[in-house]
Structures are given as C-alpha cells and as structure tokens.
C-alpha cells in the first residue's frame, strides 16, 4: 500500500512526531529554568506566597521546636548518607521532624523555627519557616535539603575535591566493619553457609570502601556549585545550654510570654497547662500576639542524663506531657501544633481583645 502514498507524505508523517517531541522538550526546559530562577529569588517567591496569604500560614505566635538528636554518626554530620536508604543513620527521623514542624496541607508555618541539635558533635541545623522556599513534604527531598546544608556547611579546606572525606574512607570503613562484626557476650553469631567460601576480611573492607567512595562522589556531583538553601542554617559549637540562652533572649519583651516546655511522659498534661494559661492571660491584643513557645523533645533515643539534669534544673523550663503512651517525636510536634492552633483561635475569637494599657 505504500506505493499509493507520495514520498513527501511519508516524510511528513515521520517528521511531525519528532518536531512535537522537540517542541515539548524545549518548552519544559524553558519553564523549568524560569521556575528554578524564581525559586532562587527569595523576593519573587515571597511575592507569590505572600499574596493574600496563600500558601503561607500566618500566625503571630512564635514557636521554636528543639529536637535533641543523639548518637548521630560523623558521616551524617558530614552529609555522607544515602537519601535512598534513610533508615541508615536515622535520617528519616530528622526529615519527619522537619515536615511535622513546618508543613500543613498546602501551607508552611512561617511562625515556626526548627532546631535539629546533632549530638555529640555540637552542630545544629536551623530551619526557619519564614525563609524556606520550594519546600516539599516528602522525606527523600527533605533529606536532600538536610544533606546540602551539612555538605555546604563544612569548612572550605574540608571540601576541596572531597579529599578529607575520601582519605578517611579506610578508617571509617574499618571501624564500621569491626562494630558490625564484633560479638558481644551471650550474642549468637550470624549463620554462614558451610558450602560457601568465607570472604576475607580485607576484601570485605575493600568493597565497603569502594562503595563509600562511590557514595561520596555521587554526593559531591549532586551538590557541586550549589549554595545553601534559603532558611536552612548550620550552627557550629552549639550546645543545649547555649541554645536555651539564645532562645530565652528572643522573648517578646516584658509584656509578652515565653513558655519553654520539655516534653516527657511524666510531665503535666499539656491541655491542662494551656487551659490554665488561657484563663490567666490578660485579655488584650498585644499579649495574644506576643507569645513565644519553645518545645524541647528527644529523638528516638529520648533524653540523655545530662539533658534531663540541665532541663529539670532550669527554672524557666516546665515539663509537659501528651499522655503516658510514648509517641514518635514527629507525632508530638504535630499534636502540640494542634493544641497551640486551637488555643490561639479561641483567644482571637472569644475575647475580642482591646489594646493593652501602657505602663506608667
């Protein structure tokens, strides 16, 4: 049947799909470039999000959430982890805390700052809800944001060609091998197939080292030439005592209130604490708008003995609870947000506050 069709029609039929594909590719690339440029411009992004308050949750209550993350490995602090395996190093816990602290449905909490304190390295990642841009709630993307913050937060001497990270591969892999293969008293050894020849220890370490070097190379390529993301800040030499002092200094003034809560199963019920505060708070607009709440939580390992001693010995810290059942850190953040949102709405709707009287 091809002889009944002219040659030019066959050529046209072949060229139309190719032209359509090229046009679609160029259009997508142009729009992606425009979107990327827009996301890298804080002022332009703010204009989009702040117009009629769409996309941003505006709340005058300032909230600080401090998560004490214990037993964080040096690799995690250096940003060396696989975003496709978030359970290794418990990056999934960090990512869920960011999502729970800042995200609600299609909106960002601009009144909330999150502090991930990585112990024992005295390094803190601060995520500022009022400055973040192009934030998505999935854990993998959140892990990439944290990884770039950690990767870009190191000194330049440690990042030139990744020499410091690569040179430590042998020691890091050897320590990992010894930790994973050492037997504690009373533990059972792993099953080994008697028909298979055991792999020499040197070869296992060599294979692990190659895998780690390949991971470092992928991370270096992924973040090469990229600046830290807006709203993600890395603090060095940041201890819990110093962080409490800084947060306390950010109080809303003499007329405002700054609550510092330590979340635990043995504390006072949070709903009762909020009810008491709602009854005792002066009914004026300034005090309602000048409330700062700092919530302190542990990661999946809870608090250390030093944390508990410091927090319970600080007069401004009050121990609160969501019940006797131990919840995930991210769940505690979400529930606390819910209680504070409900309290704020009740204060604004029920009291119709008048302006506060100035002190003489």
Image: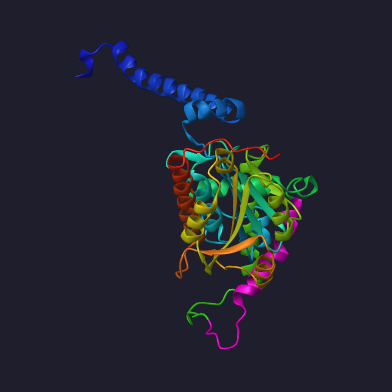
- Residue at the spot x=77%, y=47% of the render? 155
Q: Which residues are magenta?
A: 163-189
At x 46%, y 70%, the residue is 324
| Quarter residue 132 falls in | top right
Q: Quadrant of the C terminus?
A: top right
Q: Is residue 353 left or right of residue 65?
A: left
- Residue 141 position within the rendered picture, expressed as x and y whole percent measured from the top left: 52, 45
**Does 171 appear in magenta?**
yes
Q: Position of residue 25 (x, y in %)?
A: 45, 25
Residue 216 in sight here = yes
**Is 218 in front, or is 192?**
218
Vertical order, 133 against 118 (above or below): above
The spot of residue 15 in percent (x, y) is: 37, 18
* Image position of 345 with respect to 95: above or below: above
Residue extending furthest toward the right: 157
**Residue nearest the observer in this picture, 191 or 230:** 230
Tell me if residue 65 is in the magenta stretch.
no
In the image shown, does 92 or 47 lie closer to the viewer? 47
Residue 318 lies left or right of residue 278; in this view the side is right
Question: For the N terminus, which image quadrant?
Answer: top left
Q: Position of residue 204 (x, y in %)?
A: 61, 69
């Amino acid at each position: 049947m091809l002889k009944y069709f002219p040659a030019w029609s066959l050529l046209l039929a072949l060229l139309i799909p190719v032209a359509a594909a090229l046009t679609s590719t160029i259009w997508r690339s142009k729009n992606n470039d425009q979107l990327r440029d827009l996301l890298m411009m804080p002022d332009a992004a703010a204009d989009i999000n702040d117009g009629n308050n769409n996309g941003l949750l505006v709340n005058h209550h300032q909230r600080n959430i401090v998560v004490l993350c214990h037993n964080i490995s040096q690799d995690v602090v250096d940003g060396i982890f696989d975003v496709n395996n978030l359970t290794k190093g418990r990056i999934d816990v960090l990512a869920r805390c960011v999502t729970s602290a800042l995200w609600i449905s299609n909106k960002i909490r601009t009144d909330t700052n999150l502090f991930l304190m990585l112990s024992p390295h005295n390094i803190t990642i601060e995520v500022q809800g009022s400055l973040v841009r192009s934030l998505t709630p999935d854990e993998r993307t959140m892990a990439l944001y944290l990884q770039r913050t950690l990767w870009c937060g190191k000194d330049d001497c440690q990042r030139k060609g990744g020499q410091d990270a690569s040179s430590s591969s042998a020691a890091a892999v050897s320590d990992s091998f010894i930790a994973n293969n050492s037997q504690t008293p009373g533990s059972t050894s792993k099953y080994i197939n008697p028909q298979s020849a055991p792999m020499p220890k040197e070869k296992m370490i060599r294979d692990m080292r190659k895998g780690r070097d390949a991971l470092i190379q992928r991370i270096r390529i992924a973040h090469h030439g990229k600046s830290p993301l807006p709203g993600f800040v890395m603090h060095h030499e940041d201890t819990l005592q110093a962080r409490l002092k800084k947060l306390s200094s950010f109080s809303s003034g003499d007329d405002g209130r700054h609550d510092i809560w330590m979340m635990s199963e043995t504390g006072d019920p949070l709903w009762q604490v909020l009810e008491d505060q709602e009854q005792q708070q002066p009914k004026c607009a300034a005090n309602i708008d000048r409330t700062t709440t700092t919530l302190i939580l542990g990661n999946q390992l809870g608090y250390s003995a030093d944390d508990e001693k410091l927090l319970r010995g600080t007069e401004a810290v009050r121990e609160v609870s969501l019940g006797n059942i131990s919840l995930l850190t991210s769940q505690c953040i979400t529930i606390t947000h819910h209680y504070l949102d409900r309290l704020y709405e009740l204060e604004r709707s029920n009291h119709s506050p008048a302006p506060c009287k100035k002190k003489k």
